[in-house]
Image (cartoon, coloured by chain):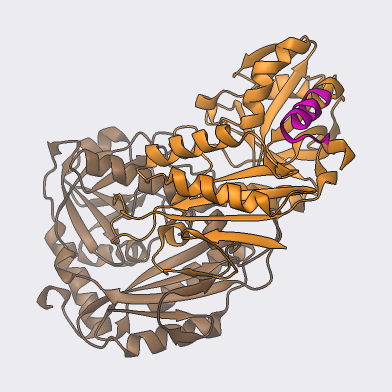
Chain colours: A brown, B orange
């Protein structure tokens, strides 16, 4: 079951979309994916803030009242189990000039079931030869222009891995195709910096703020291939899967580290926000 | 007036598109824009070949019979003046996994009038701080993930320029946001190489093959900022505008060089293919 919001109303698929909508023609827009458990969209305001910042930097109007209304109405339909809410905002239709602002952005939202069993499960990853372009503002945003991540994910799948890690033009670790990366070394937890090509992830932010309370020191940036290979543990974070331990990197086993304490922290936060421990769904 | 082809038929706007179509959600697809004059789509087969190569590399089925039929039917409606034909092919709908092949690509095509007065007119350009990521296969394709070019074009527009030049991770010239770049120095014509981040442009290919016949030597690759700044002439090529001389780079005047002979060559080729000199429309 999927529910959909488009142009101000709940509606059934498909959409009536202009063939000139720049979301479709140029990947010109932004999106967010939120985990919804028990009808509550986790980190709702943090996602909205990030989406608004990106839209503003790209010169796309942000229809905050409509977006808020869409989230509320869609979540009301999904009070049990785990769902993924996707918000998509495009520049809408403009003349053919790439630089046009646009006047009427297109907003759509969908909500569909997600399988909670994928949360906290482990993954094998490869390192991709596709560089993360940290000079492009899109590296700090969830834009609709996702082709490089699609390509790297396809490389990973061909190598029987679940995801690929991307390094930036300085050969410093930046991100995976769909997640932030954390590297554990003793009590130190390191994660790529936003100006190195990391998305300012919502779970990433929560861990940067909260992990010191359970005994970790935090460092942003400067993760080399050597540090990654020597780590006590590596894990990925994103809003839907929360945390996934990396068990192999380019076919070589990665130690498990003290990831359990961080999983506990994220499960507690989910229960605090949504009333449910995600491991019990 | 715009005519549209979608899912096997000529149709009126808007489209009935799934909100999960990966063209819309992930910029996961490819496109081509063709100049149509007198009902003839210029360099038709070269565009189709490039589109098929890109689709194949991305694992997207290429429905060549439908595409051919769409071009023929749309061009028949546009026998006079100049038109822009856009072909768009997306991966269609898949599960949420980035790596999915997809089973039924979405193909659409639109044809709309273009103003022939923009052909051969001069432009002022800036150099962008956004790097061209030549490590990404998307740098060699016209994919729907165009956000970095959109961003650079917006920077150019803010600086009262028409386009932006992009350098790659080796600080070598790669492309503009919508065109290939050529640099004239005496009798030498240089253009970025495809493995440096240049799109294998159709007009670019024609000039590489034809310019020697009018006295130019050709070189692909290795264009530094210094060479660009010292050039006798700089111009942009793409399928819609054919050739546009660059008159200023970051606000500094660029010499005109021997661009007229190359404009004559392109106008002759247009007349040969379409029966009309584009300067006479």
Query: In percent of the image, x 21 and y 49: which residue is there?
Result: A162
Of B222 and A120, the residue lying toward us = B222
Residue B276 image point, x, y percent:
81, 36
Tell me if residue A213 comes above or below residue B244 in the rendering.
below
Q: Is residue B44 left or right of residue B157?
A: left
Query: In percent of the image, x 38 and y 61: which residue is there?
Result: A201
Q: Quadrant of residue B257?
A: top right
Please, what is the dominant secondary structure of the magenta stretch?
Answer: helix
Q: Is residue A223 left or right of residue A103?
A: left
Residue B228 seen in render: yes
Residue A148 image point, x, y percent:
42, 45
Tell me if residue B90 comes above or below residue B192 in the rendering.
below
Query: In percent of the image, x 20 and y 65: which residue is there?
Result: A214
Look at the image and tell me in which quarter the N terminus of chain A lies.
bottom left
Magenta residues span B264-277
Residue A183 image point, x, y percent:
25, 48
Tell me if residue A71 comes above or below residue B86 in the rendering.
below
């Amino acid at each position: 079951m999927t529910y959909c919001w488009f142009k101000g109303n709940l509606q059934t698929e498909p959409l009536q979309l202009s063939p000139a909508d720049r979301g479709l023609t140029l990947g010109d827009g932004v999106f967010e994916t939120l985990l919804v458990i028990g009808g509550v969209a986790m980190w709702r305001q943090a996602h909205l803030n990030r989406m608004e910042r990106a839209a503003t930097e790209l010169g796309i109007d942000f229809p905050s009242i409509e977006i808020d209304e869409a989230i509320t109405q869609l979540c009301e339909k999904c009070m049990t189990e785990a769902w993924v809410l996707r918000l998509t905002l495009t520049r809408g239709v403009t003349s053919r000039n790439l630089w046009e602002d646009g006047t009427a952005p297109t907003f759509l939202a969908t909500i569909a079931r997600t399988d909670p069993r994928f949360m906290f499960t482990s993954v094998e990853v490869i390192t991709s030869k596709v560089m993360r372009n940290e000079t492009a503002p899109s590296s700090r945003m969830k834009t609709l222009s996702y082709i490089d991540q699609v390509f790297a994910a396809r490389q990973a799948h061909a190598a029987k891995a679940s995801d690929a890690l991307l390094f930036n033009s300085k050969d410093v670790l930046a991100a995976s195709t769909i997640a932030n990366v954390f590297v554990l070394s003793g009590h130190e937890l390191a994660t790529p910096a936003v100006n190195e090509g990391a998305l300012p992830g919502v779970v990433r932010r929560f861990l940067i703020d909260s992990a010191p309370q359970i005994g970790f020191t935090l460092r942003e940036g400067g993760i080399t291939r050597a540090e990654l290979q020597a780590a006590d543990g590596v894990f990925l974070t994103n809003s839907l899967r929360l945390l996934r331990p990396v068990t192999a990197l380019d076919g070589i086993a990665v130690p498990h580290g003290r990831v359990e304490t961080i999983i506990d922290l994220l499960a507690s936060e989910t229960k605090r926000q949504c009333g449910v421990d995600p491991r019990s769904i």
